[in-house]
Amino acid sequence: MRHAPRLQRRAVMRTGFAALIAASFIASPLYSGAANAEEIKAQRVLAIGGAVTEIVYALGEQDRLVGRDSTSTYPPEANALPNVGYIRALSPEGVLSVKPDLILARENNGPHEAVEVLKSTGVRWVDVPDDFTLEGIDENITIIAAELGVPDKGEALKKKVAADIAKARARLASVERKLKVMFVMALTDGKVNVAGTSTAASNIIELAGGDNVITAFSGYKQISNEAVIDAAPEVIVMMNGRGVSTDHAAPNALLEAHPALSTTPAVKTGKIIRMDGMLLLGFGPRTGEAITKLAEALYGHEY
């Protein structure tokens, strides 16, 4: 208890330092023209969120990007941009270091205190909805295109994305029976974290013609071994690729050794699908590609 005052002082110092940094940027000439934001297109855009960055590139406006967050790894050339940190662990210093005049941020950003400081600087901050649906993709493209002053490009991109998705979905007509699918977010210390309803994982499974076996709750949660056994998934889907932890990309050997997962038809038949997390769950311009790849992995020659 005797250390509490010291910890409080440190917290105040950190907050004060962040505010001081923010204040110095507000005073900068770069930010003094906020009143003219409606008249002048943003020229120094910071994209926070993988799908946000992908949309900017798909609109052909990538030359205005001055930075990105660590989840923005596609297209590959985006990796050459300055990285301001993880979307949920932003700092005012890191974000403002690239001197943006527009910040486009997926809604699951944070921490709250840092974001509030950033919003107080006068730099235009636009929250892009975290809506992992087809309607959400449309809305995100509309918002980003409007902020970049290219609404016509936005309309063209929406039509292309819709056509890609429709083409991918049309091929599902040949699938005779939906497979029972479980999305495993992570396997940590033997505990299985899975996707329930109202999640990007559940939505992409349904769009690819699968049937999410976890319907008792929404969001991502750990479930008991008994629940895993009762769910009896025919297919397990997991993330794979750069940037995922070993918990997210658990090798087959761990699944085969797990007391519950090892009993499932999915593990017994080796029907374990791994896909790049941002492609699979991003719900950005590549959603048609994500549906196609997942459906191909689920149904093979039937698709």
Image (cartoon, rainbow, N blue to C red):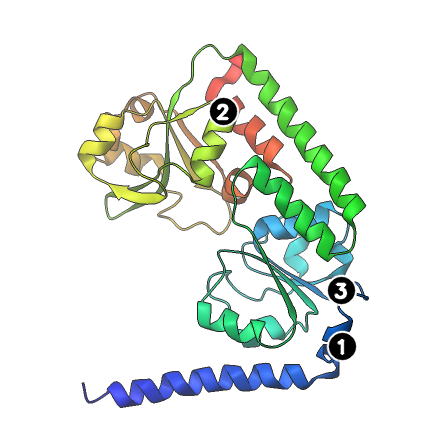
Q: Is residue 224 left or right of residue 285?
A: left
Q: CA distance from mark 3 to mark 2?
A: 41 Å
The residue that label 2 is drawn on is 297
Q: Which mark is residue 82?
A: none
Residue 131 appears in view: yes
Label 1: how many residues lie within 10 Å, few (<14), some (14-19) or many (20+)? few
The residue that label 3 is drawn on is 42
Residue 3 position, x and y percent, is 23, 87
Q: Amino acid at mark 2?
A: Ala
Q: Is residue 228 left or right of residue 119?
A: left
Q: Earlier in the sequence, mark 1 or mark 2?
A: 1
Q: CA distance from mark 1 to mark 3?
A: 11 Å
> Is the residue 289 above or below the residue 82 in the image?
above
Question: Which SS class for mark 2?
Answer: helix
Q: Which mark is residue 33?
A: 1
Residue depicted at x 70% and y 69%: 101
Q: CA distance from mark 1 to mark 2?
A: 51 Å
Label 2: how many residues lie within 10 Å, few (<14), some (14-19) or many (20+)? some
Residue 161 position, x and y percent, is 67, 34
Residue depicted at x 47% and y 61%: 88
- Asked if disc 3 and disc 2 are in contact, CB closer than 8 Å, the reply is no
Q: Earlier in the sequence, mark 1 or mark 3?
A: 1
Residue 284 appears in view: no
Q: Is residue 1 left or right of residue 239?
A: left
Nearer to us in this view, 35 or 60: 35
- Asked if disc 1 and disc 2 are in contact, CB closer than 8 Å, the reply is no
> Is the residue 228 above or below the residue 32 in the image?
above
> Is the residue 97 above or below the residue 4 in the image?
above
